[in-house]
Amino acid sequence: MTHYQAIVVGGGLTGSAAAIALVKSGQHTLHLAPKGAPDRRTSALMMPSVDYLERAGLLENPDSLGHPLTQIRIIDATNRLIRAPETLFDAREAGMVAFGWNFANAKLLERFEAVAAALPDLVTQPLAVSHIASDDTGHHLTLSDGSIVHSQLLIGADGKNSLVRSSAGFKVNETAFEQAALVCDLELARPIGGTSIEFHYPNGPFTLVPAGGSKANLVWIDRLETLNAARSLDTEAFTAKLVERSQRLFGAIKVLTPSFIFPLSTLSVARPGADGVVLVGEAAHAFPPIGAQGLNLGLRDVADLAGVLANADRTQPDWANTVSRDYANRRAADLAQTGSMVDTLFRSLLAEMLPVQALRAGGLWALKLLPALRRQAFGIGMGKR
């Protein structure tokens, strides 16, 4: 049996960032990162997340890997009785160059892996976990090659179906939606520059995110059967559907990559840490891709874990339990606020009740007309604390 101070389970962006943060805090760490299919999605990281990546040495220059998001444009494309106004948010109004940057997940992961490879106290293995048992000494993990490893602190970054979470007995609250998300890359005849454009339809937004030059990343949320029907069309018919959904504002559209569809749900735990186990990323929380909160929230998990570790007294025999408890306390307010915000936003987009539609439209009118309120919304949306 091989002993480590900490083990991170999960090879995605949040897991990689967590493993690096642990090593930089002085932990001899094992990162279990089995190779999966390439992640063809993109992530819009807001400025607090970009700032953390730069401080942590995970990113030198955001322009080298990503594309700046300078504006957010919201267009109510429904035919409802009460419609919201078209609204434009500009980063310059908040005194910023950009709200954040849009990154290809695969390129960002390559950067994280390059940083990890240069850390001598980080051991990375492409192995899965088959069993976890915990006792007073810590956590014993049986790996897919039959070996057993042990650690005092265990980090679950293994996604919605987290084995770490279920083995530790965390209770989960999960709600599945009828909607799903279709993603692919597009080339537009008329570029969108640095503006992320959201067309709000009755079953979710159709969003074009800047990807540099005339390219854009599409995130189309709708009922699963609608998306499956669209994807089954031939190239010409599928492209015509995209032109229609984008209100013909950008001329001809060319599809550059295969489209992928994934179901949408919300997932949360009452507390993301206990008994020497810490949950980060989608092991602790998952949302529909509304308001660009998914990976941003996961990186705030990692930043708070790093903060807790910086103050941890590892001479104490129960230091891992203390870390998990302090982490859970530190994350409570942010997880509650963000979870409530995203859930409210998503449900308000889908609501057919006139009072809810009126509240949503009134809220966007207020954001459009009141600069002070708009600046406050900027801060909440970017996860400033």
Image: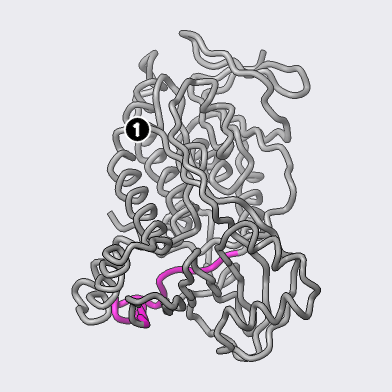
The residue under the point 64% across, 78% down is 242
Residue 77: x percent and y percent?
A: 46, 78
Q: Is residue 340 positioned above or below 97 on the image? A: above
Nearest the camera: 288 or 330? 288
Res 66 → quadrant: bottom right
Nearest the camera: 26 or 10? 10
The magenta-colored residue range is 86-103
The residue under the point 67% across, 18% down is 142
Q: Quadrant of the N terminus?
A: top right
Nearest the camera: 275 or 150? 275
Nearest the camera: 115 or 178? 178
- 93 vs 106, left or right, is left
- 193 vs 107, left or right, is left
Residue 160: x percent and y percent?
A: 55, 39
According to the picture, the residue beneath numbered tag 1 turns out to be 328
Which residue is farthest top? 136
Q: Residue type at mark 1?
A: Ala
Residue 292: x percent and y percent?
A: 46, 61
- 210 vs 70, left or right, is right
- Inspect the magenta stretch and tell me whether residue 90 lies in it: yes
- Inspect the magenta stretch and tell me whether residue 18 lies in it: no
Of helix, strand and loop, which one carries label 1? Answer: helix
The residue under the point 75% across, 24% down is 144
Residue 129: x percent and y percent?
A: 67, 25
The residue under the point 53% across, 85% down is 193
